[in-house]
Amino acid sequence: MAAVVLVTLTLVVTVPGLAVGRALRLRGWLLAAVAPLLTYGIVAAAGSALPLIGIRWSPLVLAGVTAVLATAAWLVCRRRRDDDRAADLPVWSRVHHLGIAVAVAVGALVGLAVSYRATAGFSAVPQVWDVVWHSNATHFIAETGLSHPSALKSLNDPATPGFYYPNTYHVAAATVVMITGAPVVTVIDVSVGVFTGLLALGMAALVRQNGGRPALAAATAVLSCAFTAFPYDLLPWGTLLPFNTAVSLLPGFLALLTAVLARRGDPLGLPLGLGLGALGLLGLHPSVIIAAVPLGVVLLVGTWLDRRPRAADIGALAVAAGAAAVLGGPLLLASSRAAAGTAHDWPAGMLAADALGQLLFLGHEQTYPQYWLVLLAVLGLVFRGAVRPVLWYVAGSTLFAVLFVMAASYEGTLVAVLTRPWWNDKWRFAGLWSLAVVLLAAGGLVAVRDGVVRLAERVFPALRRVTERRRVAVSVAALTGVTLVVAVVTNGLYFTRNETRLAQAFADGPTVSPHEVRAFDRLAELVPEGTLVMNDPYDGSALMYALTDVRPVFASPLVPPYDIDAMGPDRRVLFESFNRIDTDVAVQEAVRHLNVGYVIACKGFIAPANEPAPGMRGIGTQRSLTSVYENADARVYRIDLTRATARPNS
């Protein structure tokens, strides 16, 4: 089943984007890299707009929307002549293209293998906070076809006003569930395995569009799978699946922006693609499109320093913005309204010097830094000839390094304002910064390769007189040899380190243990359709919905006071006072209003929670609850309000 899901997921996230991108006259590495981004843009636009006219999501809807957009793009671009400036890029031979394709495949396969082992063959139940919501949201969309971002409020409280959650990741994942019938857990696990492939492809395209060498493109693709900070750290930390997907696609987006500014292709098709790609990032995670802005500004300023600014640049960006506004109007409106919501602030607990050291030595909260990658990055900075075409990306990414230190070490209004789009989360800044270090390390690897070639030419002078084809072969062989040495000294590009780190998000409990899964299965046999199950939002029981289609009262962990204050009165009463069901009329009324028929109490908790919600403490003493199933980690009760001794609240 996992293989079927992998193939289906690959097709779902690439084919629509390839169709529309080709109609926009994108080509080559750029088309390959931005195809998934364009697909997510299609999903974001259609998923938020079609529900307004009563259309529910399905794979056929995705196919139909793709056909319409591809046809419209073809009609717009078919009679226009390319302002084709591909000639200003270095010529890559077939050997170069083939070598880079192999490098992308290596980066993708290593990341896939790490994920396969860490998730027990794409079968492990995820154990971290955010994944409960992501799993249930995916299941909800697959079950109902309700793809508008506001529809997800049904999971925790249909009465929540102004609800918005970027759901493009979930709509795409739900499409895979609809096609394959696979368990949501399998789809989630497999999606974790594709991040490095998306990143490797985007990095290669970014290097290509900026005029970088084939060796640099290949090196970035290979090294994309080696850095713990991204994507692996962000999965045990919070299983930030939409954020990870968007960051993986960020280099491809900036490669497309580079092509727009260089006018390498259709002068209208490129900006239209950029607008659709921006919607993709926005629909996945708004913070990543915000992160793209300073990087894009640095690229624009660098472009204008190389040549004079021209009106066509502003015009192209205006077309991109207009395309995003037309295609994603409902999404943009919903996202802008949600931007004024309550901010979250993680406490700062590190000294600034320690934070900077962890960032620069790639050892954020790890036992050991990634010394070999640091060494390569230093070499790339010292011998920066290879990485010079993308130094603007490194320069722009220093913002994320600064924000990391601020979020990790300082409090205050300024820090809160600057880091708010990223939830004041140092882990996300470390992940964003690591993409710049990938480029530097790749530059270092190429510098070592160049040194090896020069040394070989000195030892064997005949190498200087070989044909161009043989010179390319020598260069490829040298790069392959240096890469293999790096792979050996890093124990397989830090394979074991990254697998161990990622596996922390997919352990056998404590959030959801096999015993608890058996209790969920029992609930599926007991609970009538339309009946909710009272649960503790902190013990992992919310995953019963994604695993067995049983609806819990609380479909995700809650962050007090934000989530509690936003709830309707019924769920708030149950969260705070369910353990007074025998005597509290308000609790009994909430049970009736929500049609709650059963209760489950589980043993483990979702870190950092370590105790039950207030209303779930000591529920075993309530006469209204009759135990109907029990195992080592879970107990199920049936609610019988006729046994209650209700009296008005005092």
Image (cartoon, rainbow, N blue to C red):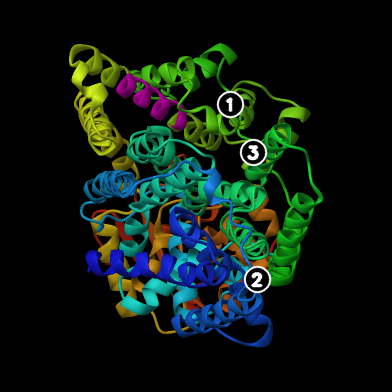
- Observer-side mark, 2 or 3, equals 2
SS class, disc 3: helix
State the residue at coordinates (63%, 36%).
424
Q: Give the residues drawn in magenta, as a range.
A: 439-450
Q: How far apart are the alpha carbons under marks 1 and 3? A: 13 Å
Determine contact: label 1, label 3, CB under 8 Å: no
Task: Report crowding for label 2: few under 14, some 14 to 19, many 20 or more residues within 10 A (C-alpha).
Answer: few
- Please say whether residue 443 is one of the residues in the magenta stretch: yes
Instruction: Inspect the image, locate mark 2, and give the three-letter code of the amino acid beneath it.
Output: Arg
Kindly tell me whether residue 516 is visible in this rendering. Answer: yes
- Which of the pair 640/163 is nearer the observer? 163
Task: Report crowding for label 3: few under 14, some 14 to 19, many 20 or more residues within 10 A (C-alpha).
Answer: many
Task: Locate residue 278 relative to residue 367 in the image: left or right.
Answer: right
State the residue at coordinates (52%, 45%).
209
Instruction: Inspect the image, locate mark 1, and give the three-letter code of the amino acid beneath it.
Output: Ala
Q: Quadrant of residue 428?
A: top right
Q: Position of residue 359 (x, y in %)?
A: 49, 22
Height in image: 405 above or below 229? Answer: above
> What residue would you read off at disc 2?
80
- Magenta: main secondary structure: helix
Q: Position of residue 12 (x, y in %)?
A: 41, 70
- Which of the pair 459/394 is nearer the observer? 459
Instruction: Inspect the image, locate mark 3, and give the three-letter code of the amino acid beneath it.
Output: Leu
> What residue would you read off at disc 3?
295
> What residue would you read off at disc 1?
401
| Disc with the residue nearer the chain's start (1 vs 2) | 2
Determine contact: label 2, label 3, CB under 8 Å: no
- Please say whether residue 286 is one of the residues in the magenta stretch: no
- Which of the pair 118/105 is nearer the observer? 105
View extreme (right): residue: 311
